[in-house]
Amino acid sequence: MSDELEALKQLYKKYGQEHVFNFYDELSAQEQQELVQELRDVDVADLQECWEITQRGDQLLDTSAMLPIDEDLIGSVNSTKEDVLQNYEELALRAISDGHIGVLLLAGGQGTRLGVPYPKGMYDIGLLSGKSLYQIQVERILRLEELAKRLTGSSGKITMYIMTSDHTKTPTQDYFVKHNYFGALPEQIKIFEQQTIPAFNNKGKFVLRTKYNLARSPDGNGGLYRALREEKILEDMDKKEIRYLHVYCVDNVLVKVADPRFMGFCISRKAEAGNKVIEKGWPSEPVGVVVRIEDKVQVVEYSEISKENSELREKDGRLTYRAGNICNHFFEREFLKRVCREHEKKIPYHVAKKAIPFVDPETGIQIKPDSPNGIKLEKFVFDVFQFSKSFVVWECNREEEFSPLKNGEGAAKDTPSTAREALYALHRRYLKEAGAIFSGGAQDAAELSPIVSYSGEGLEAYANQSINLPVLIS
Ligand code: UTP
């Protein structure tokens, strides 16, 4: 046995993980090499410590001292005057023309609930146009560039960074190439990869996926900060002079990518970080809420908030803790640099219980469990708000901005149908507000290409026009 192999075995034994070598002697030379290579790259000591932290519950927030976020940090699309909204918009569009705004799509998740074997962004929710989530998002970017050009006369580009993971990177790359980047420039779309880490069984042992591989999964959307550093994204932002990023989840069909009102609001407030929220609908709704705990801004997950706090109401009847997180974040580049430099390692892991296919370390039999048998450790993208020196919140309306695709058809909520219907309802509203008169079923489909309208603008030609639904305007 080589010295290296012996040292590796001792190391894994020290942390109670020696079972990963159980099948070593029956592996081919190539498989042995593969196993050793993988084990060599795992920071077993660090992971063991992270596991212990989550077992003690040290990562859980102490919510006993939590308070609602200060009113003066909050802006709202509903209570802000039209001319101020327009100022925000113009500020952001000018920043777009100057090339200072980028977007970063979090697309490294495994989409297990939706249950398709390809990245969620490629999913076709059954719109009249047949467009995927990725395509809709790129087209919204193109429309914003056009609006910025009309305002300023100069054509700035919005770089789209896409964080993928081991299983979403290649299909995402191939998909964009196959579709000519949906009209964007190839150099505008930068796809990078977050790391994967080994999964644990309920007793803290690494799970074997095969006799010579560990079961691994992406390290959560908060793996972003490590990936920003490792994949040199911040250097790229420096080079391109991108100062502000809109970071968002792949699965929200209504997402206002690089929303100029939100971006303009955050820029005008000189915020290092900002979060767009919707009003939480009811006490048990499973969304996290933005709160203050001892002068730090935190997102308290719905599993962490007490029943009493979740049910507290203001005099006007609204929930006290209602700033519902929808994974739409603003970050200033220098803040991200500080996070990556000083805080990244300390961002806590959270526990996600999952069904993880595995090889029984005693018998070598492959098992595919139906219910959770193990734990994936995940970081959350919002766990860095606490490090910002200036933080703001922007309230928006659910029906205009939030309809996530989480589950397959037939589930109670957040399905392809609910996403599709939310988009149609919004686009019917845009057309109605422009003065269109519908014939056909009033609830039938109406779809506006993002190339035609980003958020209801540019539809003057439809005033007093009769439109026969269903309609696709492209
Ligand atoms: P979810 O927590 O909804 O996870 O991710 P998911 O992977 O999409 O779906 P399930 O839970 O397996 O069914 C929220 C967002 O964070 C991204 C996802 O791609 C999605 O945009 N994400 C999640 C990452 O980028 N990396 C991760 O490791 C996890």
Image (spheres, rainbow, N blue to C red):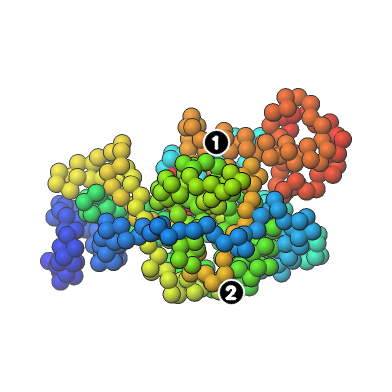
For label 2, the SS is helix
Q: Residue at x 79, y 26 (%)?
A: 439
| On-image quarter of the N terminus | bottom left
- In this view, the residue in front, 300 or 307, is 307
Task: Please say if the residues under marks 1 and 2 sit with CB atoms less than 8 Å apart.
Answer: no
Q: Residue at x 16, y 69 (%)?
A: 7
Give the class, few, some or many, for how many residues have Cα within 10 Å of label 2's Cα (few <14, many ≥20).
few
Indicate yes or no: mark 1 CB to ligand 1 under 8 Å: no
Identity, as a three-letter code, of the amino acid under mark 2: Asp
Which residue is situated farthest in the top direction here? Answer: 440
Which residue is situated farthest in the front direction here? Answer: 315
What mark, if any, has residue 416 been given in the picture? 1
What mark, if any, has residue 238 been given in the picture? 2
- In this view, the residue in front, 355 or 308, is 308
- In this view, the residue in front, 87 or 219, is 87
As displayed, is residue 371 above or below residue 61?
above
Q: Position of residue 19 (x, y in %)?
A: 16, 55
